[in-house]
Amino acid sequence: MPSKEPPRRRVPGPARSRNAAGGSGRPRPTARPDARRPRRPAARQRRGGSPKAIRLGSPRPRLRLISLCLTLVMLAFVVRLLQVQAVDADTYAAKAGKNRYLEYTIAAERGEITDRGGIALATSVDAHDITADPKLFTPEESKAPDAPRQAAALLAPILGEDEAELAKKLSTPDSRYTVLARRQTPQVWKQIKDLKSVFADKAAEDRANGGPGADVLAGVLQEPTTRRVYPNGDLAAGILGFVNAEGKGGGGLEAQLNERLQGEDGKIRYAQAGGRPVPTAGSTETPAVAGTDVELTIDRDIQWAAQRAIADQVKESEADRGYVVVQNTRTGEVLAMANAPGYDPNDLGQSNSAALGNAALQDVYEPGSTSKVMSMAAVLEEGVATPGTHVTVPNRLHRGDRLFRDDIDHPTWYLTLNGVLAKSSNIGTILATGQLGKNQAEANKVLYSYLRKFGIGSTTGLDYPGESPGIIAKPQDWSTSQQYTIPFGQGLSLNAMQAASVYQTIANGGVRIEPTLVRGTKDADGRYTASDAPERTRVVSEKTARTLAKMLESVVDDEEGTGTKAHIQGYRVAGKTGTANRVDPVRGVYKGYTASFAGFAPADDPQITVYCAIQNPTKGSYFGGQICGPIYKKVMEFALKTLQTPPTGSAPARLPVSFKPGE
């Protein structure tokens, strides 16, 4: 049996090709220790040694790091999302709404003011508040580097505003709202809209041509509101007052009745983009509630007649100012209250600031002889004299530390008490009122009590802004001269409405009725509410009042009276003149005169009371009978005809004015 040879060891080394050894030419596969392992690249041969194998690092740490980073990023997003949508949701929603949503006020329509016949004296018309979104004027939004300046230059001539001020308002990018001008007419807004349209078209064309499409007026907006207008210009301006730039009453009844007139504003909120509403985003609106309409006791026509008459005389006399008050004798309603000079509430910028207000209620002055009717009322009511009581009136009368005189020098007059009033004697009045007490101090107290009953030293009851109560000291504080000057109207002060109320009291049978200016109101639902009945106070008896009415007729009807220029054909007229030394309101000293006239008609059935006064006439006469008597006549005649008051059917009483010595 042949012996077996041991197997040959394979020497590691490069495989050789059979072709190289002369074999069959078929390559012999290289022996591999593990056929399943992938082939590794041959290692470089080290010098002097065997090659070293290179191993790849594990990818797991890198993957973990990337996963951690992504997790942290996602966690930050989640935290931020929770903050925005949960924790601070309201805050961020508010910020988003501030930028996206605009909210503005819907101005309530201010109530109308009418005269007693329903004729509008103050009303409201449509207007626009011109506003802007300053953010839309930034270079990024407007595509123009100086949009505020360009827009201001375009808007200033239209709005009548200062160009620099407009540019400043538009240069506040942190704000989304600013008011450029309030209560502009529809014509003004139309001009601005036309300009906006022109610039918008140019911007669109520029964008179509590849340009930036700059539009410097895109951020100009408007809010609908109302504007107060006075259809009759300066008529009754002193009563009505005016509305300020904020839409609130700035004076007169507009201020006094502001809460009733202004109503309740509404609100509207809408989404916007580029200054334009987004219809699909929805909006919320709270409707405005219109203000209450106010009906005055004023008669527009009588107010016009009174205002024209006093304005003409103030101009002719070159006086400081004047007032006329017309009152319904039986109801206390004020039919007219005119001031001159006046002002136009439609154009306050051109008005004299000194003329603003209602001087008939705010000016106080010494009335002079028109005040004597109160002294005579006290004398008659206390029973210390009658219209026929004889009063000897010297040319001069020494009382206290002064020598008193009448307005003219005269010989001794022999007058009845009626004659003292008819001739307006200061000395006769001092003598008559001296009988009111056992001594002068007691007489002063009695007279003071009547002056207070007539309303001197108290407001009239109108509650009008700035109304003065007048000035009268307590009797114990009267100076030596005041004890004798107050009976004839110097040393006390009142306003024109108070003076008219004195004569309304006599005309109404001795019952004073608080004057009224508001007849009633009509709310937004159309419900009319009449004003409360005014307070009535008896001052003197009806007998005393009727006696005084007859005495006042002598002032106008008797040829010796001082008020003959107030005579009205067909009517019996009762009245009294007044000429007082005037206190200069600036210097605080007597300078010039106050001329006045007061009365009522028909004297036998009084319906209307008229009072007028002129301050500091410097041209022509300064006597009340001469310059105020004609005003009284014009206004009274017009009022009697307007109210269709029938003529008097009986003759005047014609009480005696004088007596013969020894009778």
Image (spheres, grey):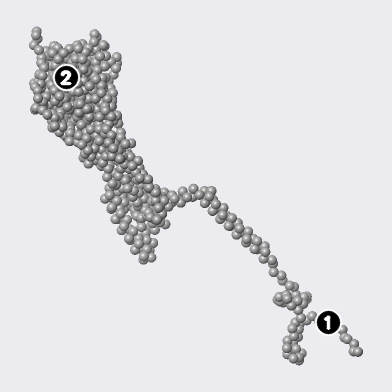
- What amino acid is labelled 1 in the image? Arg
Query: For numbered disc 2, what is the local secondary structure?
Result: helix
Which residue is rendered at x = 78% and y = 81% of the image? Answer: 13
Q: Which of the 4 image quadrants contains residue 527?
A: top left
Residue pointed to by mark 1: 9
Between label 2 and label 1, give the one nearer the viewer: 2
| Residue indicated by mark 2 | 546
| Residue 145 image point, x, y percent | 39, 56
**Is disc 1 surrounded by few (<14), some (14 to 19) or many (20+) residues within 10 Å?**
few
Q: Earlier in the sequence, mark 2 or mark 1?
A: 1
The one of 472 and 464 positioned closer to us in this rendering: 464
Against 317, residue 660 (above or below) is above
Q: Is residue 430 visible?
A: no
Going by the image, does 275 lie left or right of 513? right
Question: Where the N terminus falls, by quadrant?
Answer: bottom right
584 vs 105, nearest the viewer: 105
| Residue at image location 28% in from the left, 15% down from the top | 475
* Residue situated furthest right in the rendering: 1
* Residue at the image point whose x is 9% and y is 27% from the top: 570
Question: Residue 604 at x, y = what percent?
Answer: 13, 23
